[in-house]
Image (cartoon, rainbow, N blue to C red):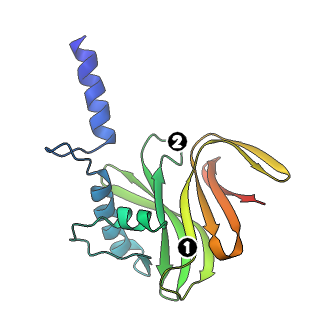
Amino acid sequence: MKRIVILVLLTIAQQWDVNAEGIDTTHFHASKLISSYLNDSLSAYCPIVQVDIDSSQFLIDLNLRQGYSCFSDFNGDKLIDYALLLRDDSNHVSLFVFNIQISKVSHIFIDNYGSWPEQFPLLEVGVEPKGIWRAADEKLRVLHDGIFLSEVNESITYAYYWNDGKYKKFIYD
């Protein structure tokens, strides 16, 4: 019985990073890794809500509070994925998903929503729970949590889900 308990504890420790005080620091590490990755590999993009990489505030959490990021296991690999709206040098706002395995970050471009010169675009992302998704003339069974995006001023909502090795778009009516 002791071996089973030890294996369970190791599995939990791999999915969540808890410091000595018992505080979950998963998003802090993810924020630092994604910030470094942006600087190195996607330097034309920056988060909508920016934060100094050495700050005590977390990039993921700040953008989450403003509705510009979300996280879940979007692709079914049992690891946390991070969806983040980013702005490029010409004020175009795009949605990216960042996957982190150990300390290696990769990204997938999802969609572009045009130019938003305002400081805070009227866009919001969040987790769309897996299950049955319905639109006026479509019904879809989704196996993993998805990403919803709402254009607040247009009353348009999309959801993106992982299927056959890529993200697909679902349009709510």
Q: Earlier along the polypeptide chain: callout 2 or callout 1?
A: 2
Q: Position of residue 86 (x, y in %)?
A: 48, 74
Vertical comparison of 150 with 48: above or below = above
* Along the line of sight, the residue nearer the viewer: 77 or 84: 84
Direction from residue 17 to residue 70 in the image, left or right: right
Direction from residue 102 to residue 94 in the image, left or right: right
- Please name the residue shown 74% across and 44% down the image: 140
Task: Tell me which amino acid carries mark 2.
Answer: Gly
Q: Secondary structure at mark 2?
A: loop
Q: Position of residue 109 (x, y in %)?
A: 55, 66
- Please name the residue shown 57% across and 72% down the image: 123
Q: Residues within 10 Å of mark 1 (few under 14, many from 20)?
A: some
Vertical comparison of 133 with 50: above or below = above
Q: Are marks 2 and 1 in contact (CB under 8 Å)?
A: no
Task: Tell me which amino acid carries mark 1.
Answer: Ser
Q: Which mark is residue 153?
A: none
User: Circle 1 sits on which residue?
Assistant: 94
Q: Quadrant of residue 105?
A: bottom left
Q: Residues within 10 Å of mark 2 (few under 14, many from 20)?
A: some
Q: Is residue 133 visible?
A: yes
Q: Position of residue 119 (x, y in %)?
A: 47, 85
Mark 2 to mark 1 CA distance (whole Å):
23 Å
User: Circle 2 sits on which residue?
Assistant: 76
Q: Position of residue 97 (x, y in %)?
A: 50, 60
